[in-house]
Amino acid sequence: MSYFCADHLRNHTKMEDKEVNSQDQILPVDGLGWSYVDGVLHCDGMSLEDLRMSLKREYGHQSSPAHVYSLSTLFANVKKYTEALGPLGKRGVLSYSLKANNNLRVVEALRQAGVTMATTVSGNEILMAMKAGFAPTNIIYNGTGKRRWEVELAIRHRVLLNIDSEFDARLIMGVAKETGVMARCLVRLNPDLEAHTHPYMATALADSKFGVEVQQLEKVLQIVRTGEIEGEEEHVDIEGLHIHVGSAVSRTQVFADMASVAARTLHKIRERGWPRASLINLGGGLNIRLSGGHGKGEEDSDNLATPQKLVGAVLPLLPEGTTLLLEPGRSLVATAGVLMTEVLGTKTNGEVTFLVVDAAMTEVIRPALYGAHHPVTHVTVPSDQERTEVDVVGPVCESGDFLARRCQLHPRLPTGTAVVVWATGAYCSSMASSYNMRPHALEVMVRAPDLYTVVRRPGNFEDLISCYQ
Ligand SMILES: Cc1ncc(COP(=O)(O)O)c(C=O)c1O
């Protein structure tokens, strides 16, 4: 990790004309760390124009596009959860879902901010969570298709495993027997609940691939239950259950419905041989608030569920003595990140004006994958009021390569001007690809008005070809 703390970062860009369009300065997210100062976007007090110049000096053409993270926003997002779970004391646990953003420094920052557990979906995510400082017993491993080495890694380290199916139960049971280490488990339930989100983000409908159907629960418990047979050792301890109904969930009621099913199921698990089972993991899923237009499932409403409302709705439904675990991803990291990108040119084809930038679907796949909306704004707000509707697109050779459609931006942004794509802290860097031989983008974290750290150096051609034999 390189640290940059330099005087040149204090020379904040001066605007020639401070009469800027105030409409442009309304922030699309409610992240505490972002602000427009004299028409220039700042992250935790640092001008993004100054940051850009500093990165350019260091990395030349590899400095753009760049993911920029606000440390204060990460901390503020964690605080919303820890405050909501506060009344539960030790019975309220916050776990971070690494899949949303697995940058080592981001994960470390979340742990330092107060996240106590990590939710993972692969063996390598387990290793990454450990590298970020999480104790193995504070890691959850979840997956519909776990490989043997991943299960063995988890069991040997006393990681908590979510049982996802009958075959998963057999695999976990087999590895636990073989290693002689008791497997700590939750059962992931598929309660057939509507999450009211994009179909690709719904994970607990009757025909979703995730979890154990309610009617299969008994069978799964039988597979892992051996303790009651005379002389036979126990190999699997069921500590509770897990339900995750999907991502970008905006309705509080969905979480209350999950809590009701969870309470009934916990009761069953206790009756069937694990009387001490007491953990209810209600997954992640909470959506974020975005102003401006919105894509499918990304509601912009005053009724949007918040950590406070979620905990308030589920608490009365949980059995006495339950530990409530939440494992958000998006709502912890999305608003802490923007993708800063430079204009390559503007063109008009038919009725559509395209702003072509140097970022692409390789850095932000969500618009192409889910029709998700990520607002785009200027880094320095042009002082004249002229705005036009543009589609912001990248250089990747696909018609689906768009970052945002129908954005109101200045019609003549010169080549090299910077714009930002908002809410890219979640499911952007971690979903990046090298399609078109595009290396991974640079990632920086702003820690103070005059201090940023490079938390991932930009990828290069060597990275892309070093795997060939
Ligand atoms: C099991 C599980 N838990 C938690 C999450 C985090 O969800 P989100 O980022 O929507 O909070 C996911 C993501 O889909 C998940 O699959």
Image: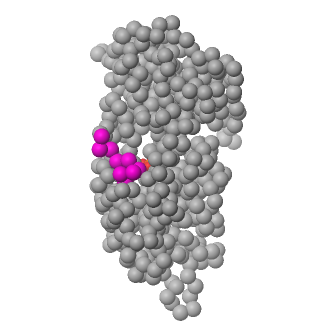
- Residue sitting at x 59%, y 50%: 111
Outermost residue, top side: 16
Determine whether 6 is above or below 301 in the image.
above
Left or right of 208 in this view: 429: right
Q: Does the magenta portion include 108?
A: no
Determine whether 457 is above or below 61 in the image.
below
Left or right of 315 in this view: 196: left
Q: Which residues are magenta?
A: 302-310
| Residue 61 visible to an observer of this rendering | no
Q: 166 or 32, which lies in front?
A: 32
- Residue sitting at x 56%, y 22%: 47
Quadrant in the picture for residue 183: bottom right
- Residue sitting at x 70%, y 32%: 3
- Residue sitting at x 51%, y 38%: 73
Determine whether 362 is above or below 174 in the image.
above
- Disc count in the image? 0
Q: Does the magenta portion include 309?
A: yes
Q: Position of residue 432 (x, y in %)?
A: 52, 38
Determine whether 177 is above or below 140 in the image.
below
Q: Position of residue 431 (x, y in %)?
A: 50, 41
- Its colouring scheme is one colour
Q: 295 or 62, which lies in front?
A: 295
Quadrant in the picture for residue 176: bottom right
Outermost residue, front side: 87
| Viewport quadrant of the C terminus | top right
